Amino acid sequence: MEPVEYGIIGGSGLYHMPGFERAEAVRLKTPFGEPSDPFVLGQLAGRRVAFLPRHGEGHRHLPSEVNFRANIFGFKVLGARAILSASAVGSLQEKYEPGDILIPDQLVDRTRHRADTFFGAGIVAHVSFADPFCPRLRKALVNACLERDLTVHDGGTYLCMEGPLFSTRGESLLYRSWGLDVIGMTNLQEAKLAREAEICYATMALVTDYDCWHPDYDTVNIEEVLRILASNAEHAQAVLAAVASAPPPDPSCHCQHALDTAVITRRDLWPRETYHKLRPILQRVTEPGEAP
């Protein structure tokens, strides 16, 4: 199978990408279970791309039910060097209005029940995650938004909550007081796992509402959220396709060297079964003859 250059993850309201040529659905099984849906592979803007709807076609998976490890592992097996994602978020600050786009550069984790590492079972790695989003992909997303005269904010902190319920007013006011920018339910695990898999990753955060802190928007209305998402879907698709039309970051990007000094378990102690499960992720840092 011809490897892909990019992976694209569609979030709420973005379940397909127009413009795919020679598209084919590929169902993968991974050591971590099945991904959210079959991957759709094809040519997009002249590049080989794999698309995956995060919540499955028809939005079947809760945020806490998304098999993030299988999704990112699948992109790794397919050869992706970069992953672009889009997700719906609530605004925690007045300046981010519904309909705006934010390209975050930081994350805060408030999830509780999700697997968010490939490692364990005898192989330990501690990967640097100070800057969780690929700076090159972030810049490309910002520029693509500006070229289309979209209201885009360069940088900000995305708080990832557990869900599926939205915030209480107390939580919303607390996160706002911390100076955080937007709140969503999915990007934290994707960013962590993409970094462990040495795949560049960045996201478009599509602002749909003011969470529940705003006195004029005291509850999150799902119908209004979906309306704004629908109006933003075409913009998001155009931006993602534009970024994917250029080559992905080259191998000099630090994201693609995240494991250089991260795996600390002595090689002769690696369990054979764990190594073989993680082989697509570990093979770059495994010298010939070193593997168990």
Image (tube, grey):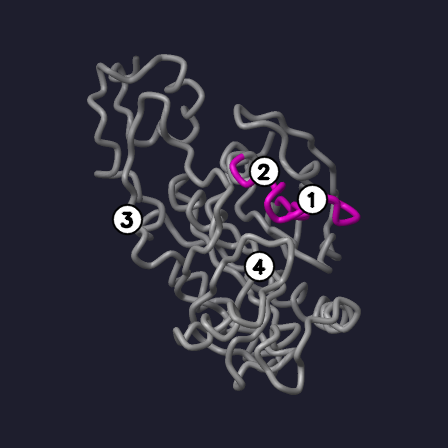
Three-letter code for the amino acid on which mark 1 is drawn: His
Give the crowd class for mark 4: few <14, some 14-19, many >=20 residues within 10 Å: some
Determine whether label 1 and label 2 are within 8 Å by CB: yes
Instruction: Report the quarter where the N terminus lies.
Output: top right
Whether 90 is among the magenta residues is: no
Q: Earlier in the sequence, mark 3 or mark 1?
A: 1
Q: Distance between the residues labelled 4 and 3?
A: 29 Å
**Image position of 172 (left or right of 42):** left
**What range is drawn magenta here?**
50-69
Question: Label 1: how many residues lie within 10 Å, few (<14), some (14-19) or many (20+)?
Answer: some
Pointer 1: what residue? 61
Q: What element carries label 3?
A: loop
Q: Distance between the residues labelled 2 and 3?
A: 23 Å
Relative horizontal placement of residue 7, taking residue 230 as reference (left or right):
left
The residue carrying mark 4 is: 245
Q: Which amino acid does label 3 sit on?
A: Ser
Kindly check if marks 4 and 3 are in contact, taking CB atoms under 8 A apart as contact.
no
**CB under 8 Å between callouts 2 and 3?**
no
Nearer the observer, 57 or 209? 209
User: Distance between the Cα atoms at labels 3 and 1?
Assistant: 29 Å
* Residue corresponding to mark 2: 67
Q: In this view, does 269 lie to the left or right of 134?
A: left
Residue hosting label 3: 128
Which sits earlier in the primary sequence, circle 4 or circle 2? 2
Please tell me which of labels 2 and 3 falls first in the chain. 2
Determine which of the numbered discs, if any, sits on residue 264 in the image. Answer: none
Mark 3 burial class by Cα count in 10 Å: few <14, some 14-19, many 20+: some
Front tag of 3 and 1? 1
